Image (cartoon, rainbow, N blue to C red):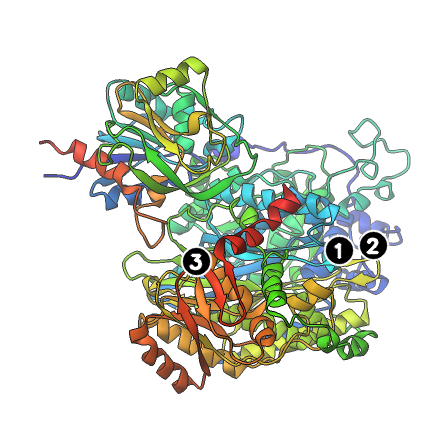
């Protein structure tokens, strides 16, 4: 049986693309490099939009990447059920693309924040969180300048009521996100946006924990035909 | 090609009067503003002698920047030669001093290049952009060697933490480093943040970058092969960073009555150009990836980044190191501002630019790679074999000079040297008369006081603004003793780097001060288990025209060269920053030293955190009563006097062997060096890092044991069953061992004296920066 193929998109200014690819590999899948300017998803089984500062975050984080050629392919595929994970800047791109509701704005403290963050997994039912248990507490690095999740009250209520908040910050909210939101999913649970960086918690030598690996093993196990 | 086409310059530019070689021959007595450009009369006369005529304004621009202190090292050269003359025999150095950065063999076919550079004055004028472009510049130096940048560090010095201006400078510098470095995707893995009155109006911002490459991929700054094309790529050239060029472009060069300027009559002298460059990290990130793809396809014969002195420096250095000649059409340089004069183009320090030499056959492919990364690239000239750097503007020759005379044969000065007048009385004013804490309560308070003092307090406020995770290879980062990066996933090959300096020690004795900075960086690297291999330096001093400063400089260089020889680790390159002073008062001499070490397997590294309950804590090394220049004297009495701790390089090397072998054999569960603040501070840091306390018995005088800053010391945590092996290692190396106590609990407890709960230590240690800066 051939391994699942998980695409990682490189936009100009993507920074954690190699790390996401490494995490995919550690999880047992084959990472496939996807280029922003191509209209081609190369038949991958899932897609990751990695962290970084696509287009320098000029204008607004994720605002320009949304118009990349590859997004013309990602958006309809995601609506058809392709699993898509946006990490940090990728989360910002997913919001700008309207695959996820709300927006990410500059941190409440105005500084870039890099710290080992305690999180609670709130929904273990999505394509990217099935290897966790609901309520599980994990430590995963957070590092962002524009990580404060905001949405209108109706959207927040809907996200909470429908279980689409997939992770919340514990102890200390690093960026002032509303309702301590660290990650959300779309209604179908195939599109997930996450501000913390699970790809930096897959190897105890280089990360604070291996707690992030579950996001990648979730998708890999889900893709293996029963 | 679209890359070239999209930036196609006009064939001719604004028709202001330009000084040509022909007009220079016709008007030999035309007055020239060499003094305003910082040139001495004899330097100007030498230019006339070299050229056999007066220089054109463009040539004067080139010589004035290339012969500046910053580019020519004219005051430091005679001293820096010692790094070569006293270099220890080594086979690890693949590229030595003189190139953009030295290259060190780390085994398995891999090499590492690393360098530190100052951006002190720009960071004072405009802290955010000054520091940001400091990072940008050093990263381009590393790319120029053919390497992929893999990490950055920075050594920062500010005025007192509670000074109003520090609240302006520090947050700006940190946000500049943070926004630029983070957007490049380079982990920031260590460095220093130091406060001292001496830096109040002259902060120090020294940025370091580390790159990795295969041996065969080393690139050099040279332009060989007549007919090869010269390509300028990266950002367009603008008016930023032009210092003296505005003097050249002033009316002196315009015939009275010629209304040639395109600024509606406004002349350049009146135009206030920002003197500090503005950085674009997004463009630099693309430039990194573009360069690595160009290197990967072997499309580059020679390469040079554009930093200080911009196009002047890149063309003269590339030509001088290559076949010797180059022909450049300055009209072809893509501009952000079409009104720039040729002298301004030559001196502009616009960021994110590189210059490459490419064979004609590869030009098309080179431009295609640049196009993929959306990097503007333009052929501006070609390599020749006639030994002259020739530049044209609108078809007229405006530069025609032998490039070596600008790049390598600048003036060399033996500046007068004499010890600063106040030094003997300062050295005589030892800290011996300062009252010491004697009661248990006083000792306890001193531990907390030091732990919360600005130089020893937690730097989290700074370091949480830096991405330490990106690239996925960071094994250790601040506040660890050194930053550690994995280079190879399979074998675990990796490197550690530490950057250290101590201006107070160097003020008291610059020869010893430089050696003590080296000692500390060496010890820090060894504490992680890495074998020290090579050295870089950034020498921050006052004005070289002050004989006292020049004496300090000469002493420091000699001390560093002698110590590198003794420790067997060569200097691979460095940077000199003079003129760090306020009025006539120079800063404390501040040599900042970087040491690179190699790990055969980073999985065997030691960290500083106390994490193993029940482990024994051993002190390695000998403690003497040494408080000259100490943190204790500084914090408690604001006292600087006496002599710094005794240098003991033999003991340093012996200690390193124990730390390295102990880590290799898996005997250590933690290792942490002793330096500023002594044993007290080391215990505070290791306890808080690991969240475990320790219970110890102090040997000898408790005050000396806790706060002395004797060199060549470290603590190691060892499981009881390994204690004998570590003691044997130490004894074999001649390193004294003292068993201090046992790790565990939630207090720092000193038998018979005091006990401090970790939460109280944590509050003292972490509260300082937010108190001053938030």
Which image quarter: residue B656?
bottom left
Which image quarter: residue B203?
bottom right
Q: Is residue B388 above or below residue B275?
A: below
Locate residue B245 relative to residue B462 in the image: left or right. right
Q: Residue furthest top?
A: A154
Q: Residue at x 63, y 55 (%)?
A: B454
Could one spot residue B45 in this view of the protein? yes
Q: Which residue is mark 1?
A: B64
Could one spot residue B459 in this view of the protein? no
The chain carrying label 2 is: B
How packed mark 1 is, by other alpha carbons closer than 10 Å (few <14, some 14-19, many 20 or more), is many
SS label for mark 2: loop
Q: Of the numbered discs in the image, which one, if any, rests on residue B34?
A: 2
Question: Mark 2 near mark 3, Cβ–Cβ under 8 Å?
Answer: no
Q: CA distance from mark 1 to mark 2?
A: 8 Å
Q: CA distance from mark 1 to mark 3?
A: 62 Å
SS label for mark 1: helix
Q: Which residue is mark 3?
A: B746
Q: Of the numbered discs in the image, which one, if any, rests on residue B10?
A: none
- Is circle 2 on the same chain as circle 3? yes
């Amino acid at each position: 049986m051939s391994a699942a193929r998980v695409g990682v998109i490189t936009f100009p200014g993507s920074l954690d693309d190699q790390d996401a690819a490494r995490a995919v590999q550690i999880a047992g899948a084959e990472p496939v490099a996807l280029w922003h300017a191509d209209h081609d998803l190369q038949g991958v089984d899932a897609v990751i939009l990695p962290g970084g500062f696509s287009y320098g975050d000029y204008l607004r984080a994720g605002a320009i990447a949304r118009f990349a050629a590859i997004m013309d392919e990602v958006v309809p595929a995601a609506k058809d059920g392709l699993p898509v994970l946006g990490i940090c800047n990728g989360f910002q791109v997913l919001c700008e693309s309207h695959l996820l509701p709300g927006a990410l704005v500059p941190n409440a403290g105005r500084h870039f924040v890099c710290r080992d963050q305690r999180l609670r997994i709130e929904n273990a039912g999505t394509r990217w969180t099935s290897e966790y248990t609901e309520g599980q507490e994990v430590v995963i690095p957070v590092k962002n300048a524009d990580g404060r999740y905001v949405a209108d009250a109706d959207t927040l209520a809907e996200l909470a009521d429908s279980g689409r908040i997939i992770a919340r910050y514990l102890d200390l909210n690093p960026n002032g996100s509303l309702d301590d939101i660290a990650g959300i999913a779309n209604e179908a649970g195939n599109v997930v946006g996450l501000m913390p960086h699970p790809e930096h918690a897959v190897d105890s030598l280089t990360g604070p924990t291996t707690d992030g690996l579950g996001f990648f093993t979730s998708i890999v196990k889900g893709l293996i035909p029963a | 090609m679209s890359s070239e086409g999209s930036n196609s310059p006009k064939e001719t530019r604004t028709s202001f009067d330009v000084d040509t070689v022909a007009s220079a021959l016709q008007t030999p007595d035309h007055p020239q503003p060499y003094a305003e450009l910082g040139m001495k009369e004899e330097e100007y006369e030498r230019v006339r002698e070299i050229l056999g005529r007066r220089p054109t304004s463009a040539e004067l621009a080139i010589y004035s920047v290339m012969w500046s202190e910053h580019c020519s090292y004219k005051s430091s050269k005679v001293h820096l030669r010692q790094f070569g003359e006293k270099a220890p025999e080594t086979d690890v150095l693949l590229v030595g001093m003189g190139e953009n950065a030295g290259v060190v063999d780390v085994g398995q076919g891999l090499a590492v290049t690393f360098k530190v550079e100052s951006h002190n004055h720009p960071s004072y004028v405009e802290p955010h952009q000054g520091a940001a472009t400091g990072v940008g510049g050093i990263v381009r130096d590393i790319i120029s060697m053919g390497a992929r940048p893999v990490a950055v560090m920075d050594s920062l010095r500010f005025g007192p933490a509670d000074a109003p201006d520090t609240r302006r400078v520090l947050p700006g510098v940190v946000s500049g480093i943070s926004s630029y470095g983070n957007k490049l995707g380079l982990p920031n893995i260590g460095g220093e943040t130091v406060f001292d009155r001496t830096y109040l109006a002259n902060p120090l911002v020294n940025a370091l970058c580390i790159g990795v490459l295969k041996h065969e991929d080393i690139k050099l700054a040279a332009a060989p092969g007549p007919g090869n094309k010269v390509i300028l790529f990266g950002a367009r050239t603008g008016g930023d960073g032009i210092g003296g060029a505005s003097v050249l472009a002033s009316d002196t060069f315009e015939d009275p009555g010629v209304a040639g300027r395109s600024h509606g009559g406004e002349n350049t002298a009146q135009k206030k150009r920002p003197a500090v460059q503005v950085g674009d990290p997004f463009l630099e990130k693309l430039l990194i990836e573009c360069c690595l793809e160009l290197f990967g396809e072997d499309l580059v014969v020679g390469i040079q980044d554009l930093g200080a002195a911009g196009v002047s420096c890149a063309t003269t250095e590339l030509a001088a190191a290559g076949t010797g000649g180059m022909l450049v059409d300055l009209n072809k340089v893509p501009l952000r501002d079409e009104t720039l004069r040729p002298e301004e183009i030559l001196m502009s320090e616009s960021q994110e630019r590189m210059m490459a030499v490419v064979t004609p056959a590869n030009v098309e492919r080179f431009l295609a790679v640049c196009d993929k990364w959306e990097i503007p690239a333009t052929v501006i000239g070609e390599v020749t074999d006639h030994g002259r750097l020739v530049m044209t503007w609108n078809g007229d020759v405006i530069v025609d000079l032998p490039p070596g005379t600008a790049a390598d044969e600048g003036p060399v000065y033996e500046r007068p040297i004499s010890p600063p007048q106040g030094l003997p009385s300062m050295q005589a004013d030892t800290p011996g008369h300062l009252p010491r804490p004697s009661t248990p309560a006083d000792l306890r308070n001193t531990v907390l006081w030091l732990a919360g003092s600005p130089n020893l307090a937690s730097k989290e406020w700074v370091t949480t603004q830096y991405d330490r995770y990106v690239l996925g290879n960071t094994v250790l980062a601040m506040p660890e003793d050194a930053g550690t990066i994995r280079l190879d996933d399979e074998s675990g090959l990796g490197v550690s780097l530490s950057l250290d300096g101590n201006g107070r020690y160097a003020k008291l004795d610059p020869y010893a001060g430089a050696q003590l900075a080296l000692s500390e960086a060496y010890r820090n690297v060894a504490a992680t288990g890495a074998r020290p291999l090579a050295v870089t330096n950034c020498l921050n001093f006052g004005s070289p025209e002050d004989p006292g400063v020049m004496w300090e400089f000469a002493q420091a260089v000699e001390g560093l060269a002698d110590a590198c020889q003794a420790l067997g680790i060569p200097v691979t390159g460095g940077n000199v920053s003079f003129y760090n002073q306020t009025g006539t008062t120079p800063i404390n001499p501040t040599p900042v030293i970087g040491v690179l070490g190699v790990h055969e397997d980073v999985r065997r590294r030691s960290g500083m955190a106390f994490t193993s309950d029940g482990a024994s804590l051993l002190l390695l090394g000998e403690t003497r009563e040494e408080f000259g220049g100490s943190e204790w004297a500084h914090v408690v009495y604001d006292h600087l006097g006496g002599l710094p701790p005794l240098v003991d390089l033999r003991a340093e090397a012996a200690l390193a062997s124990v730390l390295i072998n102990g880590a290799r054999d898996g005997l250590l569960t933690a290792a942490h060096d002793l330096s500023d603040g002594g044993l007290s501070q080391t215990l505070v840091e290791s306890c808080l890092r690991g969240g475990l306390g320790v219970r110890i018995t102090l040997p000898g005088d408790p005050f000396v044991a806790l706060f002395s800053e004797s060199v060549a010391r470290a603590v190691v945590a060892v499981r009881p069953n390994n204690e004998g092996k570590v003691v044997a290692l130490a004894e074999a190396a001649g390193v004294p061992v003292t068993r201090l106590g046992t790790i565990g609990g939630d207090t720092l407890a000193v038998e018979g004296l005091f006990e401090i709960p970790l939460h109280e230590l944590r509050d003292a240690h972490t509260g300082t920066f937010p108190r001053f800066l938030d």
